[in-house]
Image (cartoon, rainbow, N blue to C red):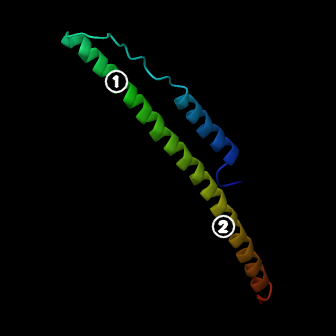
């Protein structure tokens, strides 16, 4: 039984999420030229806020996916080190127990 992270599966899931978020298109902002109607100005301001929110979300998501990839690399590295230590300890244990006699 293997314990750890399947880096290919992890990277695949992270890349899929990253691709999905990056494919979100920026909302269209309607420019009406000159208008004094408050409700039209409010619509334009709301569209601008939405566009900024989408861009912020995409930036945060990009940062998060980069962090998630680093986490996977870190886990793989730690797993390799733990496996190496486990093998060394097992070898030492086997060497030491082979000298023990039970009467």
Q: Which residue position holds label 2?
A: 82
Say if 98 sits above or below 62 in the image: below
Front one among 27 and 19: 27
The local secondary structure at tag 2 comes to helix
Taking the spot 42% from the left edge, 29% from the top edge, the residue there is: 54
Report the label total: 2
Q: Which residue position holds label 1?
A: 48
In the image, residue 69 lies at what x, y percent? 59, 48
In the image, residue 78 lies at what x, y percent? 63, 63
Assign the C terminus to one quadrant of the image.
bottom right
User: Which numbered disc covers residue 85?
Assistant: none
Say if 52 sits above or below 79 in the image: above
Say if 101 sits above or below 33 in the image: below
Determine whether, in the image, residue 1 is placed left or right of residue 17. right
Taking the spot 79% from the left edge, 83% from the top edge, the residue there is: 95
Say if 97 sits above or below 4 in the image: below
Assign the N terminus to one quadrant of the image.
bottom right
User: If you read the primary sequence from the N terminus, does the residue marked by circle 2 or circle 1 appear first?
Assistant: 1
In the image, residue 15 lies at what x, y percent? 62, 37
Taking the spot 74% from the left edge, 71% from the top edge, the residue there is: 87
- Disc 1 crowd rating (10 Å Cα; few below 14, some 14-19, many 20+) is some
In the image, residue 92 lies at what x, y percent? 74, 81
Front one among 32 and 81: 32
The local secondary structure at tag 1 comes to helix
- Disc 2 crowd rating (10 Å Cα; few below 14, some 14-19, many 20+) is few
Taking the spot 42% from the left edge, 17% from the top edge, the residue there is: 28
Tell me the distance, in whole angstroms, between the alpha carbons under discs 2 and 1. 51 Å
């Amino acid at each position: 039984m293997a314990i750890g992270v399947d880096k290919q599966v992890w990277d695949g899931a992270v890349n899929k999420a990253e691709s999905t978020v990056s494919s979100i298109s920026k909302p269209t902002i309607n420019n009406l030229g000159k208008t004094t109607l408050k409700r039209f100005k409010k619509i334009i301001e709301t569209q601008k806020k939405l566009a900024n929110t989408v861009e912020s979300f995409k930036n945060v998501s990009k940062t998060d996916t980069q962090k998630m990839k680093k986490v996977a690399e870190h886990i793989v590295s730690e797993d390799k080190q733990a496996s190496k230590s486990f093998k060394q300890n097992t070898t030492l244990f086997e060497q030491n127990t082979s000298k023990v006699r039970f009467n």
